[in-house]
Amino acid sequence: MNRPRTTPPSDPVRWVATTWDDSDALSLRRRMDAELRPRYAPFDAQRAGRRPGPPTADEIAVTWLAYEGASPLATASLRLLGDREAEHLYEVKRVYVHDEHRGRGLAVAALDAVERSARALGVTRLFLQTGKLQPEAMGLYERQGWHRIPCYPPYDADVLGVCYGKRL
C-alpha cells in the first residue's frame, strides 16, 4: 500500500509516514533484529518453524519514521493482519527506537502515530505481538493501555510470544 509521505503537526520530532520497504525503516528494523537476536538465540531450536515470516509490503498500511535532521530515530508500522467476522484486523508491527535515542518518549509517539492511522481507517481495535524476553516492550504496552490477550494466529504456536489488544 503506497501512501504519500505526510508529517503530523505539533510533534517535537519530525514524523514521516512512509512504506514498509523504506530504506530507513529497514535499517532500523535490522538494528532491532541485531539487538534482539542474542536474547532469543538460546531458544532457536525450540521455536524453529513456529515463527511466522515478516510482513510483506502489501500488508502494511503505513510505516511511521521519526527523524531528527536526516537521522532516523524510531519506527512503527500498521499491518492488515486479515479479516474475521467481516472486520479487518490490524496489528502494530516493529516498534523500535534507536538505542542512542531512548528515553525521549519516541516509542510512545510511534504507538500514537500508528493508533491515529488506524483510527483514520476506521479501526476500532488493534493487536500486537511481542516476546516474553522483552520486558521493556511489555511494560511500554501496558503503560499505554494495552491488555494481554491470548495469542492469535500466526503467533499462537510461539511459546515465547505475548499478545496484546487495545480498543481505540
Image (spheres, rainbow, N blue to C red):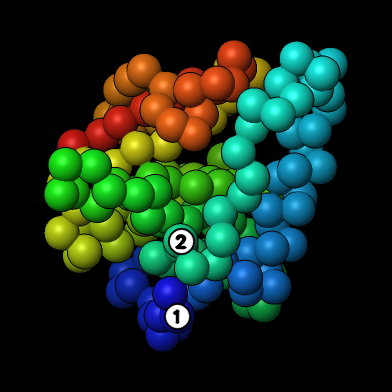
The answer to whether residue 72 is visible is no
Residue 59 bears which disc, if any?
Answer: 2
Per the image, the residue denoted by label 1 is 2
Give me the residue at 42% from left, 22% from top. 151
Q: Place residue 9 in its image quadrant.
A: bottom left
Residue 113 placement, left or right of 129: left
- Give the Cα separation between the discs numbered 2 and 1: 11 Å
Residue 102 bears which disc, if any?
Answer: none
Give me the residue at 18% from left, 48% from top. 87
**101 or 77: nearer the viewer:** 77
Horizontal and vertical percent for residue 8? 33, 72
Horizontal and vertical percent for residue 65? 53, 65
Q: Residues within 10 Å of mark 2 (few under 14, many from 20)?
A: some
Vertical relation: 160 (above or below) 12:
above
Identify residue type, mark 2.
Glu
Give me the residue at 37% from left, 55% from top. 80
Contact, mark 2 vs mark 1 (Cβ under 8 Å)? no
Identify the residue at the far bottom of this view.
4
Q: Residues within 10 Å of mark 1 (few under 14, many from 20)?
A: few
Vertical relation: 36 (above or below) 112:
above
Q: Secondary structure at mark 1?
A: loop
The quarter of the image holding the N terminus is bottom left
Q: Secondary structure at mark 2?
A: helix
Identify residue type, mark 1.
Asn
The answer to whether residue 165 is visible is yes
**124 or 146: nearer the viewer:** 124
